[in-house]
Image: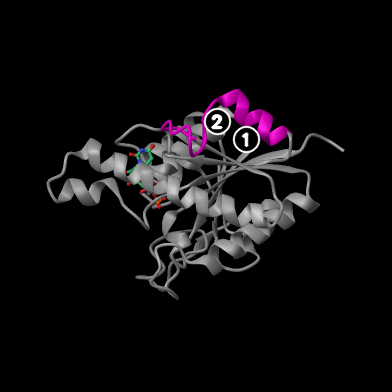
């Protein structure tokens, strides 16, 4: 058997807050995602790190739009991602899946600090690594942070799980244009030139510059995460 595949999953905070509930974090959704991750890790030769977003709690631009200092508002967003990360860790550990939260903003009582070599070591030991607090800098998103961490730990693929009902990259927004078609595969250049909203532009250009392919798929469809982790070709591959 060859080396295990090392993967990074980017999961939006909003994916944790389903429309079925008013809660900031909807437990059944977290449970399902944790279940698919645990199953996949037991059955497949993979290593997995997860970057969790915070949009269900706070977005930097929300506060900045209302007159807050951007850096302060972004820090609030980063702290939101820590809350989500702990929820995911809890669900994984309930399934006996060893997990480490590594935070980019130091909070020693809550989680380990992010140290690249330590992240890799945890992965090699079969632990799910959850990256909290993005990359620790304001003005960035967790999409860009996921791309950065994936490059740092030499992951072979970034899995971008969507939550808005769009199961890949389309020629136009399929929610507005029913004639839009989904690409099975598309180049970074086309995504940028056509301004297709896969991830923010900073994240896309980073992936392009560092030859990091992205699989865009619908995280909310049960079973899809399991398929994506097993290398099944669902959604759209951007490379
Ligand atoms: N954020 C930040 N730096 C980072 C990552 C995140 O400042 O490295 C802040 C930013 O304000 C962002 C918020 O955290 O709006 C929540 O992250 P994001 O919007 O990426 O979450 P998602 O949309 O994936 O739920």
Taking the image as shown, residue 37 lies to the left or right of residue 104, namely right
Which residue, given by chain and number where applicable, does mark 1 sit on? 155
State the image coordinates of residue 120 (x, y, percent, origin top left): 65, 29
* Labels 2 & 1 near each other (Cβ < 8 A): yes
Instruction: Give the quadrant of the N terminus.
Output: top right
State the image coordinates of residue 198 (x, y, percent, origin top left): 43, 51
Seen as rendered, the residue at the extreme left is: 67
Give the colour scheme shown.
one colour
Residues 54 and 99: in front is: 99
Q: Residue at 45% across / 76% down in the picture?
A: 20
State the image coordinates of residue 42 (x, y, percent, origin top left): 78, 51
Q: Residue at 23% across / 52% down in the picture?
A: 62
Figure check: 172 above or below 67: below
Please indicate, yes or no, whether residue 220 appears anywhere in the rendered image.
no
Which residue, given by chain and number where applicable, does mark 2 sit on? 151
Q: Which image quadrant shows ligand 1?
A: top left
Residues 208 and 202: in front is: 202
Using the numbered discs, state the Cα–Cα distance from disc 2 to disc 1 in whole angstroms.
6 Å
Figure check: 188 above or below 167: above
Figure check: 215 above or below 146: below
Q: Secondary structure at mark 2?
A: helix
Figure check: 118 above or below 88: above
Q: Is mark 1 within 8 Å of ligand 1?
A: no
Q: Is residue 105 magenta?
A: yes
Please indicate, yes or no, whether residue 50 appears anywhere in the rendered image.
yes
Q: Is residue 141 magenta?
A: no
State the image coordinates of residue 23 (x, y, percent, origin top left): 40, 68
Instruction: Give the quadrant of the C terminus.
Output: top right
Q: Which residues are magenta?
A: 103-124
């Amino acid at each position: 058997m060859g080396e295990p595949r090392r993967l990074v999953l980017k999961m939006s905070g909003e994916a944790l807050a389903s429309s079925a509930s008013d809660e900031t974090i909807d437990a059944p959704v977290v449970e399902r995602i944790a279940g698919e991750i645990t199953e996949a890790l037991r059955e497949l030769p993979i290593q997995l790190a997860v970057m969790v977003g915070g949009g269900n709690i706070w977005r930097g631009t929300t506060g900045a739009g209302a007159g807050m200092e951007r850096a302060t508002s972004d820090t609030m967003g980063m702290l939101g991602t820590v809350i989500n990360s702990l929820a995911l860790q809890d669900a994984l550990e309930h399934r006996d899946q060893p997990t480490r939260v590594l935070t980019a903003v130091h909070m020693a009582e809550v989680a380990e600090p992010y140290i690249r070599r330590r992240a890799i070591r945890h992965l090699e030991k079969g632990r799910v690594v959850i990256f909290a607090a993005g990359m620790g800098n304001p003005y960035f998103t967790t999409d860009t942070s996921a791309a950065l961490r994936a490059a740092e730990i030499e992951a072979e693929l970034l899995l971008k799980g969507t939550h808005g009902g769009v199961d890949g990259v389309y020629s136009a927004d399929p929610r507005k244009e029913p004639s839009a078609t989904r690409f099975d595969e598309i180049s970074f250049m086309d995504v940028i030139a056509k301004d297709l909203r896969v991830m923010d532009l900073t994240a896309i250009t980073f992936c392009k510059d560092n030859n990091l392919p992205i699989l865009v798929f619908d995280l909310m469809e049960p079973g899809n995460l399991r398929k994506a982790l097993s290398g099944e070709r669902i959604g759209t591959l951007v490379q």
